[in-house]
Image (cartoon, rainbow, N blue to C red):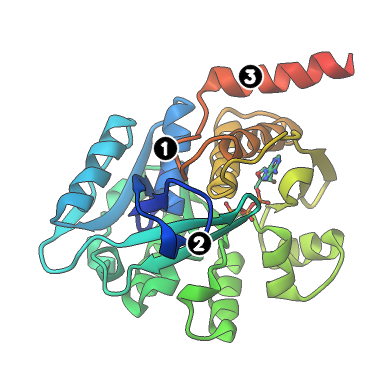
Amino acid sequence: MDVVTIGESMAVFTPTSVGLMRQATTFTMRIGGAESNVAVGLARLGHRVGWISKVGSDEFGKAILSFLKGEGVDVSRVKMDGEAPTGIYFKEQRRPNDTRVYYYRKGSAASRLTPADLDEKYIAEAKYLHITGITPALSENCRETIFAAMAIARRHGVKIVFDPNLRLKLWNEADRAKEVMLRMAAESDVVLPGEAEASFLFGKHSVEEWGSRLLDMGASLVVIKLGANGAHYFTNAHHEYVPGFPVERVIDPVGAGDGFAAGLLSGLLEGLRLTEAVQRANAVGALVTMVEGDADGMPERDDVERLINQRREDVT
Ligand code: ATP
């Protein structure tokens, strides 16, 4: 595999109309979860990607597996748990710019992942291990599983890419979230926080300060996401701001960060210059916001190239 990722995927229900969800009468169902979104993004860009997880032995678990298999994600290391359900979540669009999520995932099949569910060889043979701050928030055993996977990656020289994806709703205590995420960042090669996450981890500072703190902790590449404005990247040798791609109308912001991670990983796998890899990440993130659904808007290579070339034509 080019990339192996670990985490929970869920059935996502969205009311078909904007407004309070309590008044909704019809919902669409799609599949979502940060790590499987990244997997779909990478597969659509033509990379080999495996997703490690657990799903319930129920209709939603089967829907997740069919969707990911259909997208070309390797699900050979996903286990079915006959004793716990697949998690679900609801995505309410209260107003055009106000999207809220409600989780029903406590005790889900994925929250029962343990280090014994990891296949060392599978992770060892990947080029990158992608992880997020969501999985360790699901349960103590999930936290142990993530640290065990990171230890395997480090033992075998597999680069670790960490997206904090802070979800305070999933943590009992904010301090605990901070402590775990800082430990994860310290053991990662690439760290991809948004501004709010960097501020949560280090306090209100400049992006330069956040970048240098994360480099000092041991990362070789730090990319700080700025929403519509794009991103900054930092290495020990260089720091650069890479502008985003303006989106006229955001349809669904969820999944932009996952698209960004997929775009960046894709660029790193292909050995692009960092500026170009971050540009690809920005393009994928922007394209994801234009489509309803967490993973549904992940673009194919042509779509990404078209958006980037359009920018080139605009500036020349
Ligand atoms: P998520 O909610 O998916 O966890 P995040 O906080 O990790 O998101 P954002 O900074 O919101 O990440 O978005 C990630 C990237 O997606 C941005 O750096 C940018 O490249 C792109 N992006 C996000 N929102 C927009 C937008 N409105 N217009 C253009 N690009 C966007």
Q: Sort mark 3 into few (<14), some (14-19) or many (20+) by Cα contacts within 10 Å.
A: some
Horizontal side, residue 316 vs residue 125: left or right: right
- Give the residue at x 68% y 58%: 194
Q: Percent position (x, y) of residue 207?
A: 83, 59
Question: Are the two marked residues, 2 and 3, in contact with CB atoms closer than 8 angstroms?
Answer: no
- Amino acid beneath label 1: Val
What is the quadrant of residue 40 in the picture? top left
**Location of mark 2 (residue):** 20
Q: Percent position (x, y) of residue 129?
A: 45, 50
- Give the residue at x 65% y 17%: 306
Going from the N terminus, do you reach mark 3 or mark 1 first? 1
Instruction: Report the disc number at residue 40.
Output: 1
**Location of mark 3 (residue):** 305
CA separation, marks 2 and 1?
30 Å
Depth check, front residue: 24 or 245: 24
Depth check, front residue: 214 or 236: 214
Going from the N terminus, do you reach mark 2 or mark 1 first? 2
- Amino acid beneath label 2: Leu
Going from the N terminus, do you reach mark 2 or mark 3 first? 2
CA separation, marks 2 and 3?
38 Å
- Mark 3 lies on a secondary structure that is helix
- Give the residue at x 43% y 45%: 16
CA separation, marks 3 and 1?
18 Å
Horizontal side, residue 231 vs residue 120: left or right: right
What is the quadrant of residue 53 in the picture? bottom left
- Give the residue at x 74% y 74%: 202
Is residue 150 something one can see in this rendering? no
Horizontal side, residue 231 vs residue 7: left or right: right
Label 3 beta carbon within 8 A of ligand 1:
no
- Mark 1 lies on a secondary structure that is helix
